[in-house]
Image: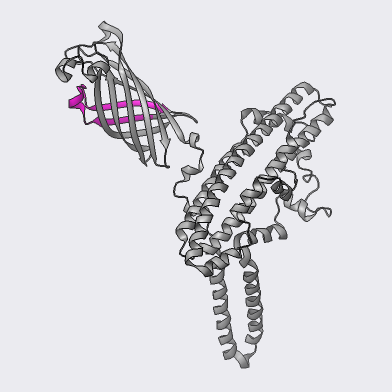
Amino acid sequence: MIEDSTEVVHVAEVYIRQQYRQHLQYQQKSARIQRRMLRRLQRQEARTVAKIRRSDSALYAQYQQLNAVSFDSLRKTADTGMLRRLAGNKPVKALDSLQKIQSFIQQKVPGAGLSVPGMDQLNNQLNTQEYLNTQLKKRSDALNRLLSQSAFGSELTKLNRTYGYAAQQMQYWKKIVSDPDAAEQKALDLLQGIEGFNEMLNPYTQQGINGNNLSAKDLQQMGFQTKSSVNAALEQQFGSQLQQVQQQAARQVQDFSKQLGVEKQLNKVRGATQKVKDVRNEVQDAQGKIKQARQGIRNPKEDLNNPMRGIPFWKRWEYQYTLQTQRASADGQKPVMLQAGINAAFRYSPRISLGVGVDGSLGLGRDWQHLKLSYEGVTGRVFLDGKLIWGISLQGGYEKILRPLNRPYVAIQERYGNASNVHTAMGLLQDAAYIGLMKTYRISRNQQGTFLLGYNFLNDKSGINSPWIIRLGYKI
């Protein structure tokens, strides 16, 4: 029995429900990604096959002999219950651990209610997704082996990019599931302090690896490589060419062994030497075939020119709060200004970001003896940021500044004419076009500070006191 059973039941419930919620979120998001990927792959494969049928009948005949299920068939199967029956109902390791924790707590604390509805349904859905991922990879590998050395390399690149980016997106959500937050980690630490908890999660820790009752399946679950797992990995890498490669390697070993026996006979040294050379050439040919087989299975990530596309769209946005000041004019008509705002930058690639921003200007008066708060306008901007080195980036932008009408430093009539002018109706619109260097530095784990030094090329036309822009900020 556990002394403080209430707290244990509470933390166990927190951990189980958080894990279940995260796995459910992963299943829902990855399922949407799979459906979108299947639609795109189906259309791309159909266009590619149409081109092959018109221009290369021999290659089209090879395409029809592919043993992997087509994307079109997978999509049709995914819309029915057939795929779930094919996937089976194997226990998902993470959910199986949650159910073990439920049973363990219920044994330690009789009457503890820790049931989470929908666990079995989620297990079936995750099995279905895993099975579909396996079939998608088999089809992708088969198309790579068929088209990698053909004239349809560009079509294959499109297929690989669609498959690769979707796989990266699903891996992104899977990583979130595998990284527990602070509450989950605290709950897990408390549960691990209960006697028998670790042994319950891993029943093999007390048996040792020398137990005679361990099967190949048990060893594979413990993380050891078995013959079946190695064969599965080789088959996944070499596909239909695996048997040919194995037979070729076996023949080379047998022939080489025979030559070693002949070589020991002194009266046949010359003949054996020639035969050994022939065997060496055959071995090199076999190695060349193995290398060709590896090249035939292209890694889809090789075609991913922009890894940022593997991250969800709304996760590619960075937000930056900025602050800058402008000194007062010499004639005292323009006050000291404090300009604060926010920028939103979309990470187009690991080095390039496109952004928009909006600032508000607050007047502070002429000096410390004449403090006066006043509204001095709104600024909108667009900018492009390119990372260089050591946290330094080159940034260029364009700004529109909307100034109030009733300010002494705004000479509206002189610049834009009578009151019917559009600029007069909206206020004085000033332009700013700048380019500068921005340095990013670390503040904390989730925050980064920024320092921008730029030059405004439209300073003379805007009437700003200084062409230099100094802007502080931090990113989140």
For the image shown, how many numbered marks are present on the structure? 0
Tell which residue pokes out farthest to the top in this image.
369
Position in image of residue 434 (x %, y %)? 26, 32
Residue 440 is one of the magenta-drawn residues = no
Horizontal relation, residue 250 to residue 318: left or right: right
Counting from the top left corner in percent of width and height, residue 300 is at 52, 54
In the image, residue 156 sits, relative to residue 60, either above or below, namely: above
**Residue drawn 24% across and 20% down?**
422
Residue at 77 percent across and 21 percent down: it is 6
The spot of residue 359 in percent (x, y) is 35, 22
Question: Over which residues does the magenta segment extend?
Answer: 450-474
Identify the coloring.
one colour
User: Which of the 4 image quarters holds residue 168?
Assistant: top right
Report whether 418 appears left or right of 394.
left
Could you tell me if residue 69 is visible in this image?
yes
Q: Is residue 4 at least partly visible in the picture?
A: no
Identify the residue at horizontal 28%, vertical 25% (top origin).
400
> Is 465 covered by the magenta stretch?
yes
Looking at this view, is 38 or 223 the one in front? 38
Q: Where in the figure is residue 264, as x and y percent of width and height?
A: 64, 86
Q: Quadrant of the image for the N terminus?
A: top right
Q: Residue furthest left?
A: 414
Q: Residue furthest bottom?
A: 267
Q: Is residue 226 above or below residue 345?
A: below
> Is 396 situated left or right of 77 in this image?
left
Query: Is 28 displayed left or right of 43 in the figure?
Result: right
